[in-house]
Amino acid sequence: QVQLIESGGGLVQAGGSLRLSCTASGGTFSYYTMGWFRQAPGKEREFVAAIRRNRGTTYYADSVKGRFFISGDNAETTVYLQMNSLNTEDTAVYYCAAIPAAWGTVNDDRQYPHWGHGTQVTVSS
């Protein structure tokens, strides 16, 4: 059974940085697509970034492009989200998600059958 565990959230001042981690277990992740989504209070869950583990291809939402960077470790069990130049609009619960395939529409959360429980990121002004 695939399990995803996020870590690294917390409180940071605007302009600061955080790095989130997503540790995966219970599967072979070489050909998975790993994504990050976020949900702010009163808003729908939205796509943040994704990576195809087989080729390392990355995808970003326009709102985070140039500030957030997704990467994976060589063991293919951990995916990171480096978040820079954070602002108050980045405050949300961040979720790691996985598609057990190297395809799928990365920004459609319905494509992801596996989800972590989320980690809170709060950016203060």
Image (cartoon, grey):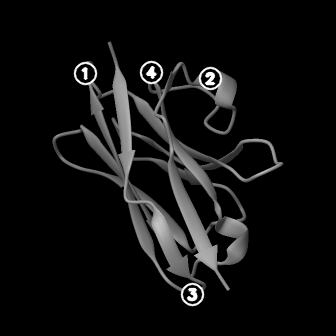
Image coordinates of residue 111 in percent, x first then y, are: 62, 23
* Residue at the spot of label 1: 28
Q: Earlier in the sequence, mark 1 or mark 4?
A: 1
**Mark nearer the viewer, 3 or 2:** 3
Identify residue type, mark 1.
Thr
- In three-dimensional space, the C-alpha distance between marks 3 and 2, rounded to whole angstroms, equals 32 Å
**SS under mark 3:** loop
**SS under mark 1:** loop
Q: Residue at x 53, y 42 (%)?
A: 95
* Residue at the spot of label 4: 101
- In three-dimensional space, the C-alpha distance between marks 1 and 4, rounded to whole angstroms, equals 10 Å
Q: Is residue 69 above or below residue 24?
A: below
**Mark nearer the viewer, 4 or 3:** 3
* Residue at the spot of label 3: 15
Q: Earlier in the sequence, mark 2 or mark 4?
A: 4
The one nearer the camera, 88 or 24, is: 88
**Mark nearer the viewer, 1 or 3:** 3
Q: Residue at x 25, y 19 (%)?
A: 26
Q: Is residue 72 above or below residue 62?
A: above
Mark 3 surroundings: few (<14), some (14-19) or many (≥20) residues within 10 A: few
Q: Residue at x 36, y 38 (%)?
A: 5
Identify residue type, mark 3.
Gly
